Image: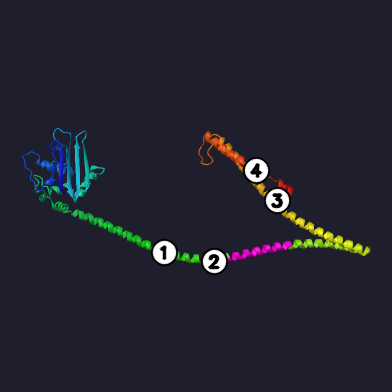
């Protein structure tokens, strides 16, 4: 710690507007003066500002200039190429109060506030920065008047502790503790890493087994898919065969019925041939039979064409009926929405928020427009063409 500046106000014998003591211009100094001139007060100001204590002890009220109600001391020093400033003040108003501010800066003029939430915490931060307590300071760099032999009169343990503080050995103890904590942390991470490595190996083994099972299942799936395709083709062929069988059966029945009818006519013709004589009568009957056959074929063709047209008409009618029913349901749904929107406390069907009168009218108008469109579409649905066809 290298002192750079000392400022004080109403401290012991010093009043207000005391000139700043600049240490940067001083390399070696001796303070002289008559008793009570304030020589020791300068050192007391430094110790009180840094540690909150002086030759008079921890009672700060005794350090306030007689007749004054408050005092303050501001001390700046350089440490490790950083400039630190401590300002401590004391006010006698009421029960009395003390404030402590701690700031630090590097080469830039911008200072960083290092003050903690409490005076105790800020004081400890100052001691940690200096690595120096008041006791160590007064037994090393500053020998108080009448206490020059204080160090030699202390016990062995106290002298060892003070020397350790002066040499900064406690800092190495802190580093040792931090190193131990870091080793524990690294060992914990290594243990976790080994555990994760084991879990990774187990997971990799499980993944390999799963991949093997997946490959096996994929092969089985391919076989099943092929079998399914084969069964599908066989099923389609079976359906076609069944359809062909039914069609052939139907045609056979028609042929049998037609053959039966023809047989009856032939028998009749035979009987007629036996009764009728003459080539003209026989030829006439044969021509008549041929004409009936042609008419039968024509009727059969018309029947097939009619059945086809009827199937198409029925399909169109069903589609129109479905659309008609769908439109009617939509119109009924929109009418219900209009009724709901006109009720008190009605909510918007889109956002679910309660709507006012203007919004109700707007919703009703939009829904009515949709109903008109649907009714027009409903009116366009015409079954007359299909009815004529059927």
Left or right of residue 373, residue 118 in this image: left
Which residue is identified by label 4? 378
Which residue is identified by label 3? 314
Residues in magenta?
A: 226-247
Cα–Cα gap, marks 2 and 4: 55 Å
Residue 52 image offset from top left, x and y in percent: 18, 42
Left or right of residue 350, residue 30 in this image: left
Cα–Cα gap, marks 2 and 3: 47 Å
Quick check: is 234 in the magenta stretch? yes
Which residue is identified by label 1? 202
Q: Residues within 10 Å of mark 4 (few under 14, many from 20)?
A: some
**On screen, residue 266 above or below 132:** below
> Are the two marked residues, 1 and 3, in contact with CB atoms closer than 8 angstroms?
no
Looking at the rendered structure, the secondary structure element under dot 2 is helix
Single out the mark in the foreground, 4 or 1: 4
> Are the two marked residues, 2 and 3, in contact with CB atoms closer than 8 angstroms?
no
Single out the mark in the foreground, 1 or 3: 3
| Disc sitting over residue 280 in the figure | none
Residue 361 image offset from top left, x and y in percent: 55, 35
Q: How is the image coloured?
A: rainbow
Which residue is identified by label 2? 220
Residue 216 image offset from top left, x and y in percent: 51, 67
Cα–Cα gap, marks 1 and 3: 68 Å
Cα–Cα gap, marks 1 and 2: 27 Å
Single out the mark in the foreground, 1 or 2: 2
């Amino acid at each position: 710690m290298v002192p750079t500046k000392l400022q004080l106000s109403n401290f012991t014998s010093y009043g207000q507007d005391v000139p700043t003591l600049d240490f940067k211009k001083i390399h070696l100094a001796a303070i002289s003066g008559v008793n009570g001139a304030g020589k020791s007060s300068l050192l007391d100001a430094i110790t009180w500002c840094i540690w909150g204590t002086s030759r008079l002890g921890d009672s700060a009220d005794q350090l306030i200039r007689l007749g004054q109600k408050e005092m303050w001391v501001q001390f700046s020093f350089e440490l490790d190429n950083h400039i630190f400033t401590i300002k401590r003040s004391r006010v006698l108003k009421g029960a009395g109060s003390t404030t402590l501010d701690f700031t630090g800066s590097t080469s830039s003029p911008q200072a960083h506030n290092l003050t903690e939430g409490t005076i105790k915490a800020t004081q400890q931060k100052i001691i940690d920065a200096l690595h120096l307590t008041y006791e160590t300071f007064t037994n090393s760099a500053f020998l108080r008047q009448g206490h020059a032999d204080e160090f030699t009169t202390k016990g062995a343990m106290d002298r060892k502790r003070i020397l350790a503080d002066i040499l900064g050995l406690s800092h190495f103890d802190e580093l040792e503790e931090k190193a131990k904590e870091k080793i524990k942390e690294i060992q914990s991470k290594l243990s976790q890493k080994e555990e994760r490595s084991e879990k990774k190996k187990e997971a990799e083994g499980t993944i390999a087994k799963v991949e093997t099972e997946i490959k096996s299942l994929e092969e089985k799936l391919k076989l099943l898919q092929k079998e399914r395709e084969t069964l599908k083709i066989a099923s389609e062929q079976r359906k076609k065969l069944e359809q062909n069988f039914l069609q052939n059966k139907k045609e056979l029945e028609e042929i049998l019925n037609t053959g039966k009818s023809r047989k009856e006519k032939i028998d009749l013709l035979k009987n007629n041939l036996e009764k009728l004589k003459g080539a003209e009568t026989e030829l006439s009957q044969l021509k008549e039979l041929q004409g009936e056959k042609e008419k039968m074929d024509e009727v059969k063709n018309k029947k097939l064409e009619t059945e086809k047209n009827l199937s198409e008409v029925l399909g169109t009618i069903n589609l129109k009926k479905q659309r008609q029913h769908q439109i009617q349901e939509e119109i009924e749904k929109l009418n219900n929405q209009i009724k709901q929107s006109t009720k008190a406390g009605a909510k918007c069907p889109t956002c679910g928020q309660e709507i006012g009168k203007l919004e109700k009218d707007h919703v009703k108008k939009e829904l009515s427009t949709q109903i008109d469109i649907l009714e027009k579409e409903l009116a366009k649905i015409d079954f007359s063409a299909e009815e004529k066809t059927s």
